[in-house]
Amino acid sequence: MTLSKLKNSIAQIKLRNEPYLKINIILAGVILLIMAYSGIFSPEKDNYPVVCIHEKITGEPCVSCGLSHSFSLILRGRVDEAYQWNRYGMRVFLFFAGQLILRIIFSLLYSRYSSTRKQLILFDIVGSSVLFLVTFMPFLTYIFKFS
Amino acid sequence: MEEVKNNSGQNLGIAALITAILTFVLAVIPCVGLIAIIPGIVAIVLASVGLSQANRNDSPHGVAIAGLIIGIIAIMISFSQIFVAGKIARHADKWPKQIENIVNDVQDNVVKDLEDANVSIKVESNGDTIKIVTTPDKRNKEQTLEDLEKGNSSANDTVKVKK
């Protein structure tokens, strides 16, 4: 009994040192911080600390302007208004929300099925990259249209 | 002791990879793309240090390499934002001039249309009607003006008075 407990605790310590799990936990934390940022700052007060540098330099609004407002409105359930602030807001919000769920699911799968870890990481990298490209394609197009 | 050294190299690699991923996400958002240069540099430094430590300790360095590659790509995208901003700013500088040109074009077109147009003015007062009709041709107008100056009444422009 004590031996199995010892084995379990050793396995847990080994799992804690896994870089993949550490990365997943930190990324999930960062996404939660983004959600908290959108929840704390309200569109009514318009007290967002991050301003668009692009607009400051060029004097023209960019494709990602209004993204913070859009996130806040989505969190408050006002989707129509969110679309008016930024039409890609919902897409980006869904990407972050999806990534948060994926981090949790992949971490659980990683710790549970040790035989398929490499495949899982590969699937995660490819899947997340594709999702990222699909989500941020309008922004990338905007950047490379001018450069 | 060796275990600790291995972990420190790997931890730096993890920090580099996370910073690089965040930099990458920031770099593709035009609003904050320029700021991403700072975490991008941090990611590259962390990855380089982590990589050198991992090499020294013969520990796995895949995470640090991934961090380095993603960090470099992210910083390149972030740098490209400077050119984007510069190009837009240059375009924005030209926009007032372009608007002025468009307004001038519109003005010229309106004047040209008025020159070519048949203008008919009808004034009615106390049962009297005065109708002025002008022909569109500019040369005719000049001829008319000359004729009027000479006192010649065979002008193209007509003045009709009805009672």
Image (tube, rainbow, N blue to C red):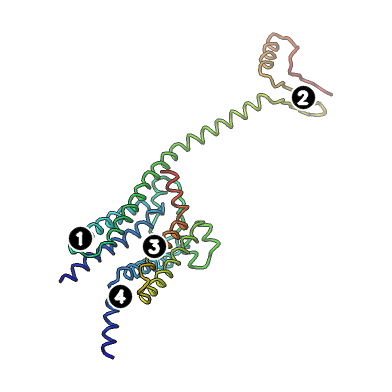
Which amino acid type is marked by label 3? Answer: Ile
Judged from the image, the secondary structure of the residue bearing numbered disc 2 is strand
Q: Residue B106's image quarter?
A: top right
**Which quarter of the rendering shows the C terminus of chain B?**
top right
On the rendered structure, is B116 left or right of B31?
right
Q: Which residue is mark 2?
A: B131
Earlier sequence position, callout 4 versus callout 3: 4
Q: Quadrant of residue A18?
A: bottom left
Could you tell me if the residues under marks 2 and 1 are in contact, i.e. CB atoms within 8 Å? Answer: no
**Placement of B143 over or under A125, stated as above or below:** above
Quick check: B113 above or below A31? above
Residue bearing mark 4: A15
CA gap, disc 4 and disc 2? 99 Å
4 or 2: mark nearer the eye: 4
- Label 2 CA crowd tier, 10 Å (few <14, some 14–19, many 20+): some
Tell me which chain the residue with mark 4 is part of.
Answer: A
The crowding category of the residue bearing disc 3, from other C-alpha atoms within 10 Å (few below 14, some 14 to 19, many at least 20), is few
Pointer 4 and pointer 3: residues touching (CB < 8 Å)? no
The answer to whether tags 4 and 2 share a subunit is no
Judged from this view, the residue extending furthest toward the front is A115
Residue that appears at 34% across and 49% down: B76
Label 3, on which residue?
A125
Give the mark nearest the N terminus, 2 or 1. 1
* Amino acid on which disc 1 is placed: Asn
Quadrant containing the N terminus of chain B in the rendered view: bottom left
Q: Secondary structure at mark 4?
A: helix
Q: Which mark is residue B55?
A: 1
* Callout 3–callout 1 Cβ contact below 8 Å: no
Q: Position of residue B4 (x, y in %)?
A: 19, 70
Q: Amino acid at mark 2?
A: Lys
Whether pointer 4 and pointer 2 mark residues with C-beta atoms closer than 8 Å, the reply is: no
What separation in Å lies between label 2 and label 1 (alpha carbons)?
Answer: 99 Å
